[in-house]
Image (cartoon, rainbow, N blue to C red):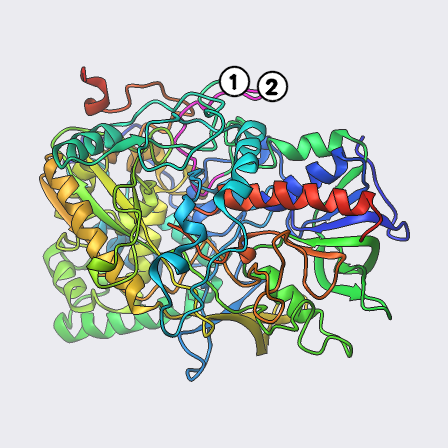
Amino acid sequence: MAVQFRSADTVDFIVIGAGAAGGVVAKQLSTAGFTVVVLEQGPYLRERDFRHDEIGVINRAAITNDPALLPNTFRRTDSEPARKQRAVEYARLVGGGSVHFTANYWRFHESDFHERSLYGPIAGTGFADWPITYYDLEPYYTQAEEEIGVSGLAGSNPFDPPRSKPYPLPPMPVKSSGVLFDKGCAKLGLHSYPAPVAILSQPYRGRGACTHCGFCEYFGCEMRAKSSTLASVIPVAEKTGRCEIRPLSYVRRIQTGDDGRVTGAVYFDANRREIFQRARAVVVCANGAESPRLLLLSKSNRFPRGLANSSGAVGRYLMFDVGAEAFGLFPEPLNEYKSIQATRVCQDYYDADPKRGFYGGGGMDARFDFYPVLFGLAGLPPDAPKWGPEYKKMLARNFTRTMTILNHGTCLAMPKNTITLDPEVRDAWGLPAMRVTFQNHPDDLKSLEWMLEKQRAILDAAGAQKIWSAPVANVDYSVHLMGTCRMGNDPKTSVVNRWNQSHDIRNLFIVDGSSLVTCARQQPTATIQALAYRAAENMAKLAKAGEL
Amino acid sequence: MLAILPAGIALAAKPSYEYFDPAAAADIESIAALIIPATDTLGAREAGVIHFIDHALATVDRDQRAVYRAGLADLNVRVKARHPAAASFSKLDKSSQTQLIHDIENTPFFEHVRTHTILGFFGDPSYGGNRNEAGWKLIGFEGAHAYQPPFGVYDGRPR
C-alpha cells in the first residue's frame, strides 16, 4: 500500500503535475530520501484502463483536457477578441503527456543551446542562448534513456550530438513507411536512420516489449511498453514509501508566507473541496500552458503580477508545435496502422542556414498518424470526393497505402505570444480560464514551406504515385507547450535559473516545457526529462544542505 | 446487390430510437447511406450508423441537436420545392436524393452528419455503429491487438 500523507503534514516537496517531468522529479526526490506529494489534476488510470477506442480517446478527450471542463480562449494578437477555441491539448492523467505521446525521443543538438550566438538577433523575438550547454545536459539525457527505456541505434544519425552511452534497447522494427523513406532519402543523398523512441523493442526492467498494436500516439499503452512515467519511474517513486501520487487534485494556487517563501498548495479534491497541503518546497510541472496559468492564478498582495514573475516573463514567449505533413500514396499495401507511428527520421535539414534568407530548419520522420475514423475524416487527398461511392472506394484503396512525412520545424519565441488569464471565461471550478495568444513568426512558416518541398521530393524519390500536402498556415493548436517560464541567468528577463529554480522564490521550482528557451525542432520530451533529472538532483543537494 | 449481407442484419427488428422520431431517423439514415453507400460492400445503413448518431445526439452530442433540427427543416423545404408530391427525403429515389445533397454539401448540417457518419462507420462497434466491423473490413483494418513484422509489402521484401 502506497504511503498517504495528511494535508496537515508538512512534506518536503509538492510536485504539481505527474507528467513527463513531474514523474521524474518525484522519483528522483523520493529515492533521495525526501517525502513527496504529487498533485495530479487527472485520474490515476492503470494499464487495464487503456482501450483501443478511437472515438473515446481522440474525439471525446477521454485522457486529455476536456474543453467542457477546462475551456481556453484563443486569439492571434492582443488586438483581437479571444474566443473559445481549443488551442492547447495536454494529457490529463497520471503520467501526463508521456502516456499518449508519439514517443519520439530526440536529443537537442549542441547548437540548439546557443543559436542566438550562431545566427544573431531576430527582430521582434526573444531569440536567446540557453544558460546551459548540451554538455551540461548530456549525462541526464543518458540517465533518462536508461531509466525510462529508449530504443534506438547510436551512431546511425551523422548529425546527432556526441553521447556517452548507446541506447539501452535496439531500434524498433522498420515499417513500410520507413523502408520507403530510406529509399527516397538514399536516392537524394540524405541520411535517414532508425527513430529513437521511448518504446520498448525488447522486455526491459520488468516491462514487456511493444506488441505493435498500432494504438500508440494519442493512446495509453496497455502493455507498459511505451515508456511513460506512469510505466517507468512513478512505480519506482511509490516503492520508496515516501511518495504519494494524489490524483484528481486540481491545484488552484500556490501559497506563500509572510517571508515570501512558498508554504504549500491549495487544491480542489475529487469532491471539489479545497485542501491546503503544506510543504517545504514546491515543484511546478504542470506543462507549458498550465504552469504559467497557475503562477498567474497565485498572485497575492506581495506578488501582484503572479508568483515568480518579477521579470514579467511568466506566460510570455509561448512556443507551439510547428510542423507540416506531406502525404504519399503507394501502389502496394504499407499497413501503416500497425505498430508505432514513426520508425525512421532524417535530420539533414535540422540546422538553420542564413543563406536561406530565414531562420529555420527541421527534422523529418516517416509516419502514419491516422486511425480509421481520422482517415475517413481527413485521410484522402484534397481533390478526392468527400462522400459517395468514389469516396468509399478511395478509402478502401488508400487506407493501407498512404504514408506521411512530417517535418518538425522551428518556432521562434516572441514576447507577444502568451498564456494569460481570460477576464471573462471560467473553468468548471470557477477559476479564470486560460487565454492563449499566438501568431507564428513569418520565418516559422517560411521554414515549413521550404521543408515541405524536401518532404515531397523524398516521397517522389521513393516512388509515390500521388503526393499532396495542405497549405501552410498560422498554427492555432498545439500539443507541445513551451517557453512560458523561460530559463536564464538574468532575473530581469527570465523566470527560472539554470537549475529550474525561481529567481524570485528559492523554494519554488518550475520544470517542464515552460523552461525551454528555444524549442529546437519540436521534439521536447527528451530535453524536458533531462532537465527534470538535472533539476531534481540539484533540489536534493540544496535541501540536504539546508539551503531551501 | 446486397446479397453479401451477413445473417441478422437484414432481419434486424424495427429499430427504436433514443432521440430521433422515425421520420427524422429515416431522413438522416438516407443521408448517411449517400455518404457511405452500399456497393459491393456494406454501407452506413447496414453498419447501423443511424444508431450511433441517435445515441450521440441523446447523450454527449446534445449540443448538436439544433443543427440537426434546422438542417432537417431546411432539407424538407428543399424537398417540397423540388418534389411537391414527395412525402419526405427518405422516400425520394436515389438520384433525387443525391441532387439535393449536392445542394447542401457545404452546409454545417451536412458536415455534422458526415462527421457523425464517419465516426459511426469507423469507430469502435461498442458505440452502436460499425456493425460486424463493416467499416474496418472495408479499409483493411484488421483490428487485432498485436501484430508481427513484416507489417506491409515494402518492409516484407528483402532489402
The residue depicted at 52 percent of the width and 68 percent of the height is A72
Q: Amino acid at mark 1?
A: Pro
Question: Who is closer to the viewer here, A456 or B30?
Answer: A456
Q: Is residue A393 visible?
A: no
Question: Who is closer to the viewer here, A54 or B127?
Answer: A54
Report crowding for label 1: few under 14, some 14 to 19, many 20 or more residues within 10 A (C-alpha).
Answer: few
Quadrant in the rendering for residue A402: top left
- Residue denoted by label 1: A203
Q: Main secondary structure of the magenta part?
A: loop
CB of mark 1 within 8 Å of CB of mark 2? Answer: yes
Question: Who is closer to the viewer here, A143 or A230?
Answer: A143
Residue A176 x %, y %: 24, 28
Boundaries of the magenta span: A203-219
Q: Chain of mark 1?
A: A
Q: Quadrant of the N terminus of chain A?
A: top right
**Element carrying mark 2:** loop
Q: How many marks?
A: 2
Residue A516 x %, y %: 51, 55
Quadrant in the rendering for residue B7: top left
Inspect the magenta stretch and tell me whether residue A326 lies in it. Answer: no
Separation of residues labelled 1 and 2 (CA atoms): 7 Å
- Residue denoted by label 2: A206
Q: Which mark is residue A246?
A: none
